[in-house]
């Protein structure tokens, strides 16, 4: 595996070497008593890479990131049916996680178009996640998309995920978030995903709401409740929040993590990065 000078730099260098446009999105995560702000998601569209070397280039990136062999085998098998590939990174004080996702939107369109069951849940993404310093720490994540789901059903799903009194506040925050979104857009303009992992208790959701046209500052009351719930000092949160407060609010994910603790994550400011690194907004469909 190629060694980066700084955590997360490896992914950026490898994608830059492709010399193509890509989408770039940042996020911050509340979990335990921690605020994790060193997180990003980078998305490439396969067709932007010449077909003759497309899969070889993408698999080569995964190899250089140190993707575990069993993940690499599964990834290689599923890659031909995917439309986009997402590369993610998250770091805390102790370690970091690399993430690679496959998106199957075209597969869904082919299988579901014109059929009576086109609104059925569909496995839209696979996520392969591992610690590059300890590949034994890894998880395969499934993202099930609900093509047609009401705001009320989404809130019912939140209730099923955040069970128990100790998870009451993140549940209420997620519900209140949906109430705000419902005043800005309609259900067909949001993308709701149920998230599970093999061999661990994680159960969470991801809901993409870029089309609601919200900025982070419009969600500040909810964000304030969130950093208070997770015992994050106000000055710590504001150091992260103030420079980005006018960025587009992208999507909210949350639920119960692998260790049984609740979490909430905010994604924001999706941009398209060109060969000259000039950014412009791009409509997203991808998850956390």
Image (cartoon, helix red, strand yellow):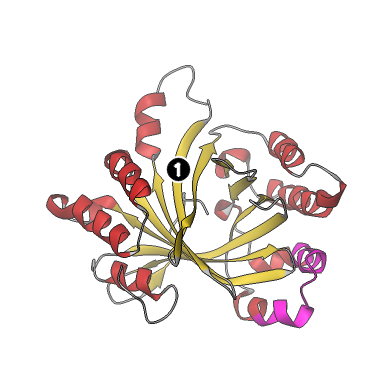
Question: Magenta span: helix, strand or loop, mainly?
Answer: helix
104 part of magenta stretch: no
Q: Quadrant of residue 125?
A: top left
The magenta stretch spans residue 235:
yes
> Percent position (x, y) of residue 76?
28, 45
Q: Position of residue 42 (x, y in %)?
A: 41, 62
Residue drawn at x 24%, y 59% as measured from the top left: 60
174 or 80: which is nearer to us?
A: 80
Q: Nearer the viewer, residue 53 or 149?
A: 53
Residue carrying label 1 = 125
Judging depth in this view, the residue of 167 and 121 nearest the camera is 167
- Residue 114 in the image: above or below residue 149: above
In the image, the segment drawn in magenta is 221-239
The vertical placement of 25 against 82, above or below, is below
Question: In screen coordinates, is 261 left or right of 117?
Answer: right
SS assignment at label 1? strand
Q: Residue at x 87, y 47 (%)?
A: 165
Q: In the rendered view, would you say 43 is above or below 83?
A: below
x and y, in percent, of residue 81 in the image: 30, 38
Mark 1 surroundings within 10 Å by alpha-carbon count, few (fewer than 14), some (14 through 19), many (20 or more)? many
């Amino acid at each position: 595996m190629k060694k980066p000078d700084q955590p997360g730099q490896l992914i950026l260098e490898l994608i830059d070497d492709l010399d193509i446009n890509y989408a770039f999105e940042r996020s911050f995560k509340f979990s335990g008593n921690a605020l994790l702000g060193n997180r990003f998601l980078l998305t490439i569209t396969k067709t932007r890479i010449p077909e003759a070397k497309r899969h070889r280039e993408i698999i080569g990136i995964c190899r250089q990131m140190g993707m575990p062999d069993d993940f690499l085998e599964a990834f290689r098998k599923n890659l031909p049916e995917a439309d986009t590939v997402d590369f993610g990174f998250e770091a805390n004080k102790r370690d970091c996680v690399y993430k690679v996702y496959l998106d199957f939107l075209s597969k869904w369109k082919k299988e579901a178009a014109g059929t009576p069951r086109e609104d059925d849940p569909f496995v839209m993404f696979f996520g392969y996640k591992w610690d590059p310093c300890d590949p034994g720490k890894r998880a395969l994540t499934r993202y099930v998309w609900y093509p047609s789901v009401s705001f009320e059903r989404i809130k019912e799903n939140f209730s099923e995920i955040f069970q128990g009194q100790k998870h009451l506040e993140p549940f209420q925050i997620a519900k209140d978030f949906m109430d705000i979104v419902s005043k800005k857009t309609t259900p067909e303009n949001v993308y709701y995903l149920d998230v599970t992992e093999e061999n661990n208790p994680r159960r969470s959701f991801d809901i993409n709401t870029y089309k609601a046209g919200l900025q982070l500052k419009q969600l500040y009351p909810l964000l304030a409740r969130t950093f208070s719930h997770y015992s994050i000092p106000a000055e710590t949160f504001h150091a992260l929040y103030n420079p980005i407060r006018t960025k587009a609010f992208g999507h909210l994910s949350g639920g119960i993590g692998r260790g049984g603790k609740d979490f909430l994550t905010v994604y924001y400011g999706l941009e398209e990065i060109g060969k000259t690194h000039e950014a412009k907004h791009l409509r997203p469909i991808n998850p956390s």
